[in-house]
Image (tube, rainbow, N blue to C red):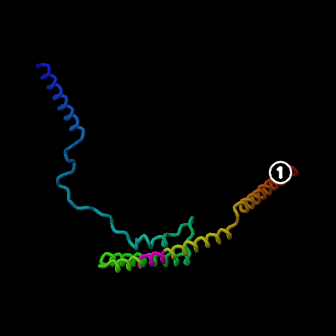
């Protein structure tokens, strides 16, 4: 019995010391000062229109990147306005669907939503096809890489040959003098 009491006392002492060591390492006391002002500091609001739908066409022009042509900007703006109109129509129809009283009204609204969605998909498909056609036109206008590299190599070889010939001529002139 005495051994059991000693064992229990040793375990209790070990647990007490273990929790005391854990408390000393976690820093459970608050570290914030009591006299701080409860005001949240926010950054100044950015200037200009930061709507993500309108910003991609108005990015700054860099030397490494060509400016977007007005034709492309007009297409982007048209597409964005159509996208906004589509979202507004869908929201309006969704509200009508929620407020519809009968199954016939709900089915009519769902059918309107389907037709609007099909029109939107047709517009997207057309924009995608136009972009593919334009990309293929541009690829035909851009010269082949091998041709460009071959021409550059030939030009560089001619420059090196001319420079070497120039040095030979200078050396001959010095030797002949």
Task: Classify 73 as above or below 139.
Answer: below
Give me the residue at 54% from left, 67% from top.
Answer: 62
Task: Classify 74 as above or below 12.
Answer: below
Give me the residue at 65% from left, 68% from top.
Answer: 139
Residue farthest front in this picture: 103
Name the foreground residue: 171 vs 19.
Answer: 19
Q: Report x, y in % for residue 176.
A: 88, 51
Q: Report x, y in % for residue 59.
A: 49, 70
Give SS at disc 1. helix
Q: Is residue 116 magenta?
A: yes
Q: Is residue 129 magenta?
A: no
Task: Classify 10 as above or below 49.
Answer: above
Q: Main secondary structure of the magenta part?
A: helix
Name the foreground residue: 70 vs 44.
Answer: 70
Crowding at mark 1 (Cα within 10 Å: few <14, some 14-19, many 20+): few
The image quadrant of residue 89 is bottom left
Name the foreground residue: 138 vs 29.
Answer: 138
Left or right of 86, for residue 28: left
Q: Report x, y in % for residue 158.
A: 79, 58
The image quadrant of residue 146 is bottom right
Which residue matches tag 1? Answer: 171
The boundaries of the magenta stretch are: 112-120
Q: Report x, y in % for residue 177.
A: 87, 52
């Amino acid at each position: 019995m005495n051994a059991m009491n000693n064992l229990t006392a040793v375990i209790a002492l070990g647990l007490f010391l273990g929790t005391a060591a854990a408390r000393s390492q976690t820093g459970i006391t608050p570290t914030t000062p009591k006299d701080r002002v409860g005001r949240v500091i926010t950054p100044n609001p950015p200037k200009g229109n930061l709507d993500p739908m309108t910003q991609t066409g108005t990015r700054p022009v860099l030397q490494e990147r060509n400016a977007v042509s007005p034709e492309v900007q007009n297409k982007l703006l048209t597409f964005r306005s159509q996208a906004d109109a589509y979202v507004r129509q869908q929201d309006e129809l969704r509200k009508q669907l929620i407020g519809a009283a009968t199954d016939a009204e709900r089915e009519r609204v769902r059918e309107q939503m389907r037709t609007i969605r099909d029109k939107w998909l047709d517009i997207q498909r057309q924009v995608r096809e136009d972009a593919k056609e334009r990309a293929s036109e541009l690829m035909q206008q851009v010269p082949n890489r091998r041709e460009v590299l071959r021409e550059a190599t030939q030009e560089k070889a001619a420059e090196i040959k001319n420079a070497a010939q120039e040095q030979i001529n200078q050396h001959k002139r010095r030797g002949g003098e």
